[in-house]
Image: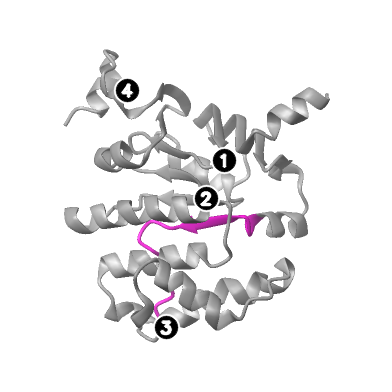
Amino acid sequence: MIEADRNTNRFVLEIKDLRKSFGDKAVLNGFNLQLSKGENLVIMGKSGSGKSVMIKCLVGLIQADSGSIKIKGQDITVLGQTELDLLRTEIGFLFQGSALYDSMTVRENLEFPLRRHKSKLNMTENTEVLIKEALANVGLANAIDLMPAELSGGMQRRVALARALILKPKIILYDEPTTGLDPITAKEIIQLMRSIQKKYETSSLIITHDVDCARVISNRIILLVDGINYAEGTYQELAQSKDPQVKAFFKH
């Protein structure tokens, strides 16, 4: 039992045999995942393969039919709401499309998670200091009093990343971080993700269709097909695969 606990603690995130159906349609069919400390793990797959459902189960927006999801050794499927809320502070989430509050300034967008969770975390740092630090880390210190509508798409994505970092989480989930961005801005976001990972020593789970993003950012890739781990390996290993489904996905 002690050895099993030691093995579990190797991973900051572990998903085992995750299953989810909607009516007669099975979306996840026994999905498995292990994320190590400091790792950038990319999940790829076609639309409808189960990526979005998996990540919604992970953050508690959807309840899985069966299986376990452990964050830092704690199974979130059996936690009460108070314990789950506290554990969620360990996770930063960069939403697809940034999901900033349009009626709030950049400062107010970053204040929002601090107001909700700072007291629970016993954080002693001044709120203004935390906000300015997060914005400086994404290169937007001068945007603090702007509205989201005054920002470009790339700047909005950077602010969203600053918001994801504001509580200094150990795990960051990226949902299609380069979607909707021009190639130059997408490369800037990818490089920013790499620098953030090194500075904060975060573990990252990245959902993406962007093969170039996967090539640059990933330590390891899981290809999700019909709700299961169809293939797994480094970018080079999957790009050289002779399997028709894998080969088609990584074909440029």
What label does residue 67 carry, if any?
A: none
What residue is shown with label 1?
Answer: 37
Q: CA distance from mark 2 to mark 1?
A: 8 Å
**At which x and y percent is residue 198?**
45, 50
Q: Is residue 81 visible?
A: yes
Residue name at image x 27 percent, y 67 percent: 153
Q: Earlier in the sequence, mark 4 or mark 2?
A: 2
Q: Earlier in the sequence, mark 4 or mark 1?
A: 1
Residue 212 in the figure: left or right of residue 50: left
* Residue 232 location, quadrant: top left
**At which x and y percent is residue 80?**
78, 53
Q: Are marks 2 and 1 in contact (CB under 8 Å)?
A: yes
Label 2, secondary structure: give it.
loop
**At which x and y percent is residue 49?**
40, 33
- Of the pair 241 and 65, the residue shown nearer to us: 241
What label does residue 201 carry, if any?
A: 2
- Of the pair 205 and 228, the residue shown nearer to us: 205
Which stretch did the figure color magenta? Answer: 88-104
Q: Earlier in the sequence, mark 1 or mark 3?
A: 1
201 is higher (above) or lower (below) than 10: below
What residue is shown with label 4?
Answer: 238
